[in-house]
Amino acid sequence: MAFRLISPPPSFHRFTCHATTVPPPPQISTATPISSTPQPPPLTCALHCPHFQSCSGCTHELNLHRPVILEDATNFFRKYGVTDFTFDTCNLWGWRCRAKLAVRGSSTNPLIGLYEEGTHNVIDIPQCKAHHPNINAAVELLRQGITELDVDPYLEDEGTGELRYVQMAVTTHNTSLPAAQRYMNGKVQVTLVWNSRNENSHGSDKLIALANFLWKNGGPQSRLHLIHSVWANFQTSDKNIIFGNRWRHLLGERDFWERVGGIDVSLAPSSFGQANTRAFDSLLQKLQKYVPYESSVTDLYAGAGVIGLSLAATRKCRSIKCVEINKESKVSFEKTIERLPTTVNSSITWHHADASKDPFSWLVGSDVIVIDPPRKGLDSSLIDALKNISLVVRKALSSSERPNSVQEEKRPWVLRANEASVQIKSKLPEANITPLVPQTVIYISCGWESFKEDCKSLLSSKAWYLEKAHGFNFFPGTQSVEILAVFKRGPQKKKPGKKKKKHSQGAARHK
């Protein structure tokens, strides 16, 4: 059964997305080509956050719409033949829909925020301008609960205390509201990271009391109706790791849904989700244009399969193969499949596997490869496989020429991936064609320096050329840029230029 959150618009005070002492921000055109000459920035594109400099979250207070890194990106892509690189500015304030915050201090003066740069001193950030306003409101409610219930924040040096961290995630998927109102009326899923082994350990009574406080004062029966659900995660490690392996749903809706890329996406609190929901949706809409209809797609580093499943729904892909190393993403993938449009008729599989192990096996059978690696970039084995794509072609052709021979799979990592896979069969008849090999690679990058190295490595092989590149402002206030790059097989095609008119010898003599 699909759960829907239905409530009247909340009447509580909301934090504004930018300081009220400055004029509203200008309407900046999105996805426009980048000029090589920087334009003077309007003053309204400043952060205006009282926590800037003390908080490590934002590194730049001015020019939120144009990170300095853009000049480097523009020059880099021009060098490799992409002269129409565009940059989508996205929302500049109130964009963060997912936040992991440390809880320190004392029960009478709790500090809820981020570490000061280079230290483990937590900076309280109650008026963060990057946060969705309802995250700030939920943090304030949590602060009240900690004080009223005498909950002890975690003390790192002693390893004592009760509440270590909190994760706030906003869902804007409320179809009972008009689309224009859904974002600002988003509800917050709260995960309390508790300093104990499980819910039966000493101090669990305070955990339940704090969860009930949040639900009573922020749940659907409250005046605010701010809270979507409350979860607990149990963590006792003395290492700098936020989450433990044990999760428990305490109150509210169990399923957390978001709408991105044209589909409803289920995200468990343990699974990865993009912090900037609107910017991610813009990226997916752009990405879809580079995937031909009825393609066969492999989505590497797939997470819960959001990218692959959005392509299945919007591009009528013949097959979608998602590969992800985090087994926690499997449940979210299965729930998302249940909400796909009935018109989707793709063969869909999800594999719990490491894409760096035997990458050739993941490349064969698809003509489009989508890769969305962590900040460190691609694994060297995958880079090598893409650079030597001709080997993939020969391997695919040789396997197709074996008459009715099916070899028994013995590689342990492939066997484990198959055992943990999820498979949805297509109703379409299987086509008897030569096995597909990649013709397009779509690279999504959150690490600019690692992307540059990966890009140069791919292009050095001459097996690929760079066709298009786009930038997205996923993290305004930082020197980070999300890149969508499209690589095509083969040497780069020369763009047609204007032919010079030939002058007659007589005309030349008169000059």
Image: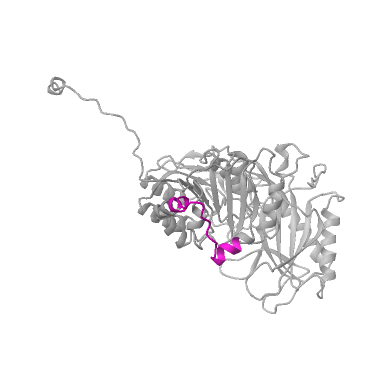
Residue 321 in the image: above or below residue 123: above
Q: Residue at x 70, y 37 (%)?
A: 180
Query: Which residue is nearer to you in this view: 139 or 198?
Result: 198
Query: Which residue is nearer to you in this view: 233 or 30?
Result: 233
Based on the displayed image, in which of its 4 quarters is residue 281 positioned? top right
- Residue 171 seen in this snapshot: no
Report the side of 342 relative to 464 (left or right).
Answer: right
Residue 203 at x, y = what percent?
Answer: 82, 73
Residue 119 in the image: above or below residue 442: below
Report the side of 180 relative to 302 (left or right).
Answer: right
Q: Is residue 14 magenta?
A: no
Report the side of 386 relative to 410 (left or right).
Answer: left
Instruction: Tell me the colour scheme of the image.
Output: one colour
Residue 46 at x, y = what percent?
Answer: 57, 48
Q: Residue at x 83, y 69 (%)?
A: 206
Q: Is residue 416 magenta?
A: yes
Residue 185 at x, y = what percent?
Answer: 74, 45
Task: Give, as a single range, the part of the protein colored magenta.
Answer: 396-417
Query: Which residue is nearer to you in this view: 499 or 320?
Result: 320
- How many circles with numbers are drawn on the protein? 0
Based on the displayed image, in which of its 4 quarters is residue 25 positioned? top right
Residue 428 at x, y = what percent?
Answer: 61, 40
Q: Quadrant of the C terminus?
A: top left
- Residue 1 seen in this snapshot: yes
Direction bottom: furthest residue = 158
Query: Which residue is nearer to you in this view: 358 or 341?
Result: 358
Report the side of 258 relative to 27 (left or right).
Answer: right
